[in-house]
Image: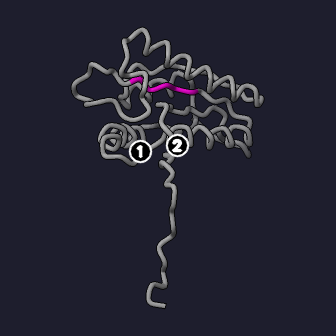
Amino acid sequence: MSRSGPFPYRHILVLLDASTAAEHSLDDARVLADAVGATLTLIAVMQDANDPTLGSPVEGLSWASTLPQTASERCASYLEDKAEALRARGLIVLTERCPGTSAEEILQISRQHHADLIMMAIHNSDAQRCLLSTVAASVLQCAEVPVILVREQQEEWTRPSMNKGK
């Protein structure tokens, strides 16, 4: 996919899992989409609560611990709430649910929507790091378009001093 002109990103795919980190990535995506006039596609990543290979659901994936129908309904409601808030700001927003957490599913949706940028959160806790950083690394490695990884924000962050002895 060629990118030309002053606004190369026309369609941004944003992965959401209801975590704080994902909410921050959505804020960043909103600012970028607003600045360049891009369409946003919000993807709800749904962890299968019955998949023993994934361990317990990570923080934020609150719909994963309920019955499948209820989980699907809660996921759809979450996506629509986020999309409506963005549409109220004048953005074009699409939504889609990703039935799993595999990088291939995410990349397939990216190709289907002709996304030219993928934004996703990376998490800090050990449980989240095991599940999502593997997915993030795979998306980063295999995506045909740029990927922005948004790190979970720390409450307090200070830049290490280069002048420790002074």
Above or below, 112 against 152 in this view is: above
Q: Return the mark for residue 10.
A: none
Q: Specify whether residue 45 is painted magenta.
A: yes
* Position above or below: 127 against 163: above
- Residue 47 occupies which quadrant of the picture? top left
Q: Is residue 109 left or right of residue 28?
A: left
Q: Nearer the viewer, residue 60 or 109?
A: 60
> What residue lies at 50% left-to-right and 42% top-to-bottom?
21
Q: Amino acid at mark 1?
A: His
Q: CA distance from mark 2 to mark 1?
A: 19 Å
Q: Secondary structure at mark 2?
A: loop
Residue range highlighted in magenta:
42-46
Camera-side mark, 2 or 1: 1
Single out the residue that lies furthest toward the bottom.
166
At which x and y percent is residue 121?
Answer: 48, 41
| Mark 2 Cα-neighbour bin, 10 Å: few <14, some 14–19, many ≥20 | some
| Dot 1: element | loop
- List the residue tagged with mark 2: 146
The dot on residue 123 is 1
- Per the image, is 162 magenta? no
Residue 90 shown left or right of residue 101 in the figure: right
Could you say which is closer to the camera, residue 117 or residue 42? 42
